[in-house]
């Protein structure tokens, strides 16, 4: 009976992990580019049940054999296997803000922080005080040539991530990569957004503020080749990939599973109390 209590308790703990992930998903339903968390579990090793006081091994002149000593198996509960991030694409929200960029496809923007490079899908950027394109927290966004310095209302980003400006108003015209005529008129190429991918992105570690950190499980960032780069949409934000209906259904499932395990513990406790009382009654 004690084993049953521990098994049910592990089930309650597993449901608590699920509830935490579902609650976090619902709390970030309106957070730009938020990626839902998903908990997965694995069963603990099963125990073989044998007859009490009999190991089932019999000796004979030819050796030994088992006389069906095992009467069944007992599960020992579950444990958290991993809490991973689902990086499926979120919907686009039009903002008409030139500083908002959304990625259509796999990949991440690269920003520099006091703790090193970090990666994000949140393209809700702004113009910093020193003229750099920054996150809302003030971390500069990196292009292939370093931090991107722009001027208000004087830049365009195409779907390939190229940043174009009117060369006549550039602070340092000699730093411009080249000039050409395109759909925006006579412009100059300032830089190209640095976009990276990971071999196992689901293992990226969340850092808060929509930032992710690479680790040994995700692998190091890989610069994306032109054919592998996601399309960049200026004037859009990527919405969270959370379906509130799915999350609410999961929350109901979690509550019912938690209550079922709770009742199992109560039943085992009641049976153990009855056993102790009966034993004391006849052997007291």
Image (cartoon, rainbow, N blue to C red):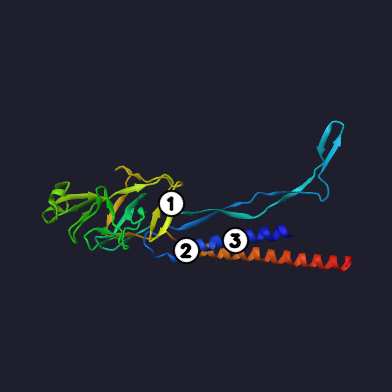
Residue at x 60%, y 61% (from the top left corner): 13
For residue 73, side relative to residue 193 (left or right): right
Label located before the other in sequence (1 or 2): 2
Q: Which mark is residue 24?
A: 2
Q: Residue 253: x and y, percent?
A: 57, 63
SS under mark 3: helix
Q: How many marks?
A: 3
Q: Quadrant of the C terminus?
A: bottom right
Q: How far, Cα to Cα, is label 1 from label 3?
A: 24 Å
Which residue was labeled with disc 3?
13
Q: Quadrant of residue 278?
A: bottom right
Q: Residue 276: x and y, percent?
A: 81, 66
Residue at x 26%, y 47% (from the top left corner): 144
Q: Residues within 10 Å of mark 1 (few under 14, many from 20)?
A: many
SS under mark 1: loop
Q: Are marks 2 and 3 in contact (CB under 8 Å)?
A: no
Q: How far, Cα to Cα, is label 1 from label 2?
A: 17 Å
Which residue was labeled with disc 1?
204
Which residue is more in the foreground, 12 or 90? 12
């Amino acid at each position: 009976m004690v084993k049953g209590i521990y098994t049910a308790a592990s089930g309650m703990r597993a449901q608590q992990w699920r509830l935490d992930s579902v609650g976090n998903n619902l709390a970030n339903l309106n957070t730009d580019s938020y990626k839902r968390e998903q908990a997965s579990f694995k069963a603990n090793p099963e125990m073989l049940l044998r007859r009490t006081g009999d190991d089932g091994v019999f000796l004979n002149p030819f050796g030994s054999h088992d006389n069906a000593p095992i009467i069944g198996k007992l599960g020992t509960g579950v444990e958290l296997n991993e809490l991973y991030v689902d990086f499926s694409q979120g919907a686009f929200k039009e903002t008409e803000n030139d500083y908002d960029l959304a990625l259509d496809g796999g990949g991440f923007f690269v920003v520099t922080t006091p703790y090193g490079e970090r990666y994000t899908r949140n393209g809700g950027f702004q113009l910093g005080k020193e003229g750099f394109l920054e996150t809302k927290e003030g971390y500069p966004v990196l292009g292939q040539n370093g931090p991107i310095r722009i001027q208000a209302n004087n830049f365009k980003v195409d779907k390939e991530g190229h940043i174009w400006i009117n060369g006549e108003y550039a602070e340092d015209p000699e730093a411009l990569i080249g000039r050409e005529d395109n759909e925006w008129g006579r412009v100059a190429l300032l830089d190209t957004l640095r976009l990276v991918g990971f071999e196992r992105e689901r293992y990226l570690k969340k850092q808060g503020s929509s930032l992710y950190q690479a680790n040994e499980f995700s692998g190091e960032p890989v610069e994306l080749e032109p054919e592998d780069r996601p399309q960049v949409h200026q004037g859009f934000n990527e919405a969270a990939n959370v379906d509130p209906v799915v999350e609410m259904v999961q929350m109901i499932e979690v509550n019912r599973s938690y209550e079922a395990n709770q009742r199992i513990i109560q039943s085992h406790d009641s049976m153990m109390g009855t056993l102790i009382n009966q034993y004391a009654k006849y052997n007291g």
